[in-house]
Image: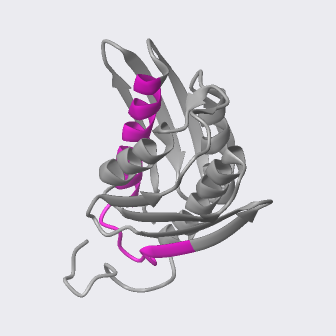
Amino acid sequence: MRMRRCEMGRKTKETFVKVNLNLDGSGKVEVNTGIKFLDHMLASFAKHGCLDLKVEAAGDMKHHVAEDVMIVLGKCVERALGNREGIRRIGDAIVPMDDALVLLALDLSGRGYSCVEVKFRGKRLEDMDSELVEHLLHTFAVNGRLNLHVRVLSGRNDHHKAEAIFKALGLAFQQAVHKWGIKGVPSTKGVV
């Protein structure tokens, strides 16, 4: 059986990122990006997705570090999935978190696309700009070659909205990568 793992790095003049991902993990998380809120969101994603995830990152600006982390994480997903044989491919989740309610659906289609509908009340989420959430999800979708739709249906607390998004991402992702016994690639085209 093919191991669905990936270790990948990225080094630019502005950042250093290293990601180790195991799609068939148990939720072991070790994340240190230098951005506490991003660390928390990635930990929520991995824990609820039953993924083993290790991320190390550093750089000159938080925006650059966060973006490069999501580039590498997306590319790791793409590599770990291989030809996507035997996976369910599609996943969804509805996640409540106190006042927040999030609907998320994804398709590991081989085509990167995102549609994220979220409005934050404030400009900051702890030590990260709130406007980064939509950008980071898009970056992950494009580099992971997956379709991603997110709708925040209700909520007042920005932290709750963001955390519910990343928990939903983990739950939906786990459904989509699940090996469910189907033979071949989950596509009428024969390729994803």
Viewer-side residue, 128 vs 188:
128
Residue lying at 42% horizontally and 86% vertically, measured from the top left: 182
Q: Position of residue 160 (x, y in %)?
A: 71, 51
Residue at image position (39%, 29%) is: 9
- What colouring does the structure picture have? one colour
Q: Position of residue 115 (x, y in %)?
A: 38, 61
Whether residue 170 appears in this view of the structure is yes
Image height of 6 relative to 155, above or below: above
In the image, is residue 86 part of the stretch drawn in magenta? yes
Q: Is residue 50 visible?
A: no
The vertical placement of 57 against 120, above or below, is above
User: Which quadrant, please, contains the C terminus?
Assistant: bottom left
Question: Residue 93, located in which quarter of the rendered image?
Answer: bottom right
| Up-down relation of residue 112 to residue 187 (above or below) | above
Q: Is 52 situated left or right of 137 in this image?
A: right
Picture quadrant of residue 53: top right
**Of residues 134 and 166, the one drawn nearer to the viewer in this rendering:** 134
Furthest residue in direction left, as rendered: 189
Image-based side of 68 in relation to 51, left or right: left
Q: What span is in magenta?
A: 63-92
For the N terminus, the quadrant is bottom left
Q: Position of residue 145 (x, y in %)?
A: 31, 57
Q: Position of residue 154 (x, y in %)?
A: 65, 64
Identify the residue at image location x=67%, y=38%.
40
| Residue drawn at point x = 43 percent, y = 40 percent | 70
Give the residue furthest to the front: 121
Depth check: give the residue in front, 38 or 24: 38
Task: Determine the main secondary structure of the stretch shown in magenta.
Answer: helix
* Residue 65 included in the magenta stretch of the image: yes
Q: Nearer the viewer, residue 190 or 33?
A: 33
